[in-house]
């Protein structure tokens, strides 16, 4: 789970009213979103018809990160706040650290999929407070301040503030869509907030006894670890876990030679490269605007947002089919904000 600066947990503990939590929860929304462009870059860089197992892992994690972003948005609405998504500052700078002063030196970029990227970045991002040991798994680590602890401290504060903390217009929350089913429900009191936070924490970390969550899905760290181990993590008849399932291999020939950490300014105005990159950035910005509307009173916009996800992938394919005019390989995916 994402390791954050302990000052964020201290700020939650010192809050005296729900209003004191608004910026902190919006930062959590930014953080839940911030991994999505990195994971999408890796997923989109896989050539169609190749690396099906790795693509399925990346896609499943992207969908759950979107769910976590939606849950955090519902939580902010429930305590009377309003998510701020449609603005340039919502997007982190790539390469660079993630929001909320995420620590231990992880710099997140927008790169093609590789085992190195998964080990050095994605598994570092998703590392739980205690890594469960299975055959070939890494040693466990000492507990640190994580986003999971942040959410748990947030629950402590909400319980301390009492029922009056849940004063938002609950009808504005996004619930029960075809995209997230029963995992996205109305947050209107402490108990529903606890259930929602549990989804975020367990899907990200697993539990201290098991690498999976209540629905049987592996936590993100262990899903990524499968690519490194070359095998699915499976549970045996006796209940033990091991990386002994079906093979999971990353075929580097099935990955586009995408320019890492691209910027639109890298490509000359008027060139095909600039045109496809600008189209990609516009699609990404439209997606953020649609999500902003979704969590600010226009819930039907979620269907528009999910449609824009498909548009974004088509735009990415155009970018990745365009030779890089200033070097070898193909153009990269900048994920830059473009005003409406």
Image (cartoon, rainbow, N blue to C red):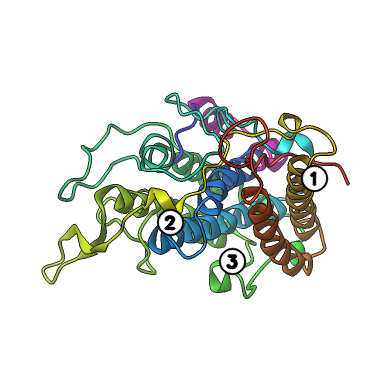
In this image, 19 relative to 254: left or right?
A: right
Does the image show residue 84?
no
Q: Where residue 139 appears, x then y in whole percent?
A: 21, 37
Image height check: is 284 above or below 130? below
Could you say which disc has been placed on residue 203 in the image? Answer: 2
Q: Residue at horizontal 82%, vertical 64%?
A: 298
Q: Residue at horizontal 67%, vertical 39%?
A: 334
The front one of 75 and 290 is: 290
Q: Residue at horizontal 24%, vertical 54%?
A: 209
The residue beneath circle 3 is 184
Q: Tell me which segment is drawn in magenta.
A: 6-26
Hey, which quadrant is residue 98 in on the image?
top right
**Magenta stretch: helix, strand or loop mostly:** helix
Q: Residue at horizontal 56%, vertical 62%?
A: 192
Could you say which disc has been placed on residue 275 in the image? Answer: 1
Tag 1 secondary structure: helix
The front one of 225 and 193 is: 225
Q: Where residue 120 appears, x then y in whole percent?
A: 38, 34
Q: How far apart are the alpha carbons under marks 3 and 2?
A: 13 Å
Q: Where residue 230 appears, x then y in whole percent?
A: 26, 53
Whether label 2 touches label 1, CB < 8 Å? no
Does the image show residue 69?
yes
The disc, 3 or 2, on the residue closer to the chain's N-terminal end is: 3
Q: Residues within 10 Å of mark 2 (few under 14, many from 20)?
A: many
Q: Pick out the residue farthest to the left.
A: 238
Tag nearer the camera, 1 or 3? 1
Tag nearer the camera, 2 or 1? 1
């Amino acid at each position: 789970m994402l390791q954050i600066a302990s000052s964020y947990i201290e700020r939650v503990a010192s809050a005296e009213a729900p209003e004191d939590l608004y910026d902190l929860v919006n930062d959590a929304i930014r953080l839940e979103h911030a991994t999505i462009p990195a994971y999408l870059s890796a997923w989109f860089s896989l050539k169609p018809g190749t690396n099906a197992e790795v693509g399925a892992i990346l896609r499943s994690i992207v969908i759950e990160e979107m769910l976590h972003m939606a849950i955090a948005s519902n939580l902010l609405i429930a305590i009377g706040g309003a998510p701020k998504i449609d603005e340039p500052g919502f997007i982190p700078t790539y390469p660079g650290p993630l929001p909320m002063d995420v620590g231990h030196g992880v710099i997140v970029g927008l790169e093609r999929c590789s085992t190195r990227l998964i080990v050095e970045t994605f598994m570092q991002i998703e590392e739980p407070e205690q890594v469960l040991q299975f055959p070939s798994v890494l040693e466990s680590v000492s507990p640190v301040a994580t986003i999971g602890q942040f959410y748990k401290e947030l629950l402590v504060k909400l319980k301390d503030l009492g029922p009056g903390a849940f004063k938002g217009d609950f009808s504005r929350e996004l619930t029960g869509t075809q995209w997230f089913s029963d995992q996205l429900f109305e947050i209107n009191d402490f108990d529903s907030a606890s259930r929602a936070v549990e989804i975020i924490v367990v899907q990200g970390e697993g539990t201290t006894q098991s690498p999976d969550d209540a629905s049987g899905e592996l936590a993100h760290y262990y899903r990524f670890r499968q690519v490194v181990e070359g095998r699915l993590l499976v549970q045996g008849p006796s209940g033990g876990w091991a990386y002994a399932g079906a093979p999971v291999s990353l075929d580097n020939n099935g990955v586009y030679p995408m320019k890492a950490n691209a910027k639109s300014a890298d490509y000359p105005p008027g060139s095909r490269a600039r045109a496809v990159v600008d189209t990609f950035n516009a699609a990404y910005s439209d997606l953020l605007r649609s999500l902003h509307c979704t969590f600010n009173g226009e819930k039907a916009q979620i269907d528009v947002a999910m449609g824009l996800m498909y548009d974004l992938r088509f735009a990415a394919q155009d970018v990745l089919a365009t030779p890089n005019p200033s070097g070898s390989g193909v153009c990269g995916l900048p994920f830059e904000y473009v005003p409406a």
